[in-house]
Image (cartoon, helix red, strand yellow):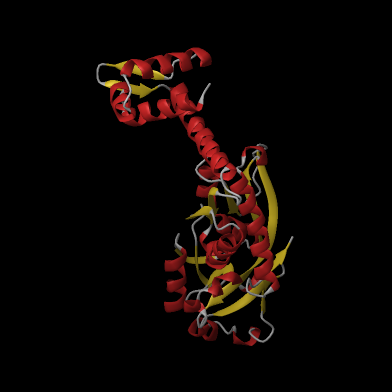
Amino acid sequence: MELRQLRSFILIVEQGSIGKAAKHLNVGASVLSQQLSKLESELATRLLQRSPLGVTPTPAGLAFLKQARQVLRYANQAIEAAQSSRLVGYVSVGLPPSTASILGVHFIQLMAERYPDIKVHIVESLSGNLIKLINNHQLDLAIIFNQPTDESWTSEPLINESMSLIGNNEFFKLYHLENYLEQETLPSNHIEPLPLALPSTGHGLRRLIDKEISKLNIIYEIDGLSLLMKTVASLCVATIQPSSIFINQHYHHLNSLKIINPTIERTNYLVSLSEEVLSPSALAAKSVIRASTNDLIQQGAWLGTSLI
């Protein structure tokens, strides 16, 4: 099997026609037909369904298409690396919104310093969606909040984040929480009667909170960090979030109390598919994420966290 066969197959699928792909490559349609037939013979399966209107990939063809794109991507990165004295390539990294708010810029800056020829693509999304993107080979690596169960993954715990009750001055005064500000902590059993705005039950943070606090007075369910925090800033409700939320200057006027008895902690996991299939660029990005995380904690910039 040759790389040009993979390139031709991908182009045929994208064009939806052997003739259109041949015209794009400035070769005869018979040349591509022969390449395709040879490829299907090597794989002992039909990759494309032919019709007068063109071609469409079979289920086997769709599976092969995804892997072929990945192979070509790594092959191109290998060629670039061989032609340069510095590591070059592309890496895609997924970060949850709360993690991106503190880690994102520092990671990008450190990547630019250490590996200026690696193109970095950052995807900010919920932890559950990032898992799907990695499984679909649309991300090289990500930070998520759940220990992955897939044995084909590589996973390592990075940090633990402590959760805090966050609310505005009016809320703290109305519910007599001002006295706790000096000690900066609040027992979890004091939270039960307080009106809260939290993510819905599909959110990993909500499941963690439900597990640790049996009764919650939830007034609003909001699946969006920006709107959630604006609600807390404007109305007489509180939320539960990691202290890293205060990296955003818009929230500096809010009050925060670390929850204790029990302490509620969320683990951040750095995950990817097996390192055997990761590109050099992805492996480099992994090392930079570790270094960036360590820098932020050592500088005291990532509040309420501890290295694992």
Front-most of 80 and 184? Answer: 80
Q: Residue shown at 57%/54% (left/top)?
A: 204
Q: Is residue 296 above or below residue 13?
A: below
Lateral position of residue 301 relative to residue 61, left or right: right
Residue at the extreme left: 53
Lateral position of residue 10 relative to residue 143, left or right: left
Quarter-of-image position of residue 79: top right
Front-most of 184 and 246? Answer: 246
Question: Residue 154: percent from the left, percent from the top?
Answer: 67, 44
Residue at the extreme right: 308
Q: Residue shown at 41%/26% (left/top)?
A: 8
Q: Residue shown at 31%/19% (left/top)?
A: 28
Q: Is residue 83 above or below residue 194?
A: above
Quadrant holding the C terminus: bottom right
Question: Residue 12: percent from the left, percent from the top?
Answer: 36, 26
Count of numbered marks: 0
Taking the image as drawn, is residue 192 in sight? no
Q: Residue shown at 52%/16% (left/top)?
A: 43
Question: Residue 30: percent from the left, percent from the top?
Answer: 34, 15
Q: Is residue 70 above or below residue 130?
A: above
Front-most of 7 and 94? Answer: 7
Front-most of 84 and 217? Answer: 84
Taking the image as drawn, is residue 70 in sight? yes
Question: Residue 145: percent from the left, percent from the top?
Answer: 61, 54
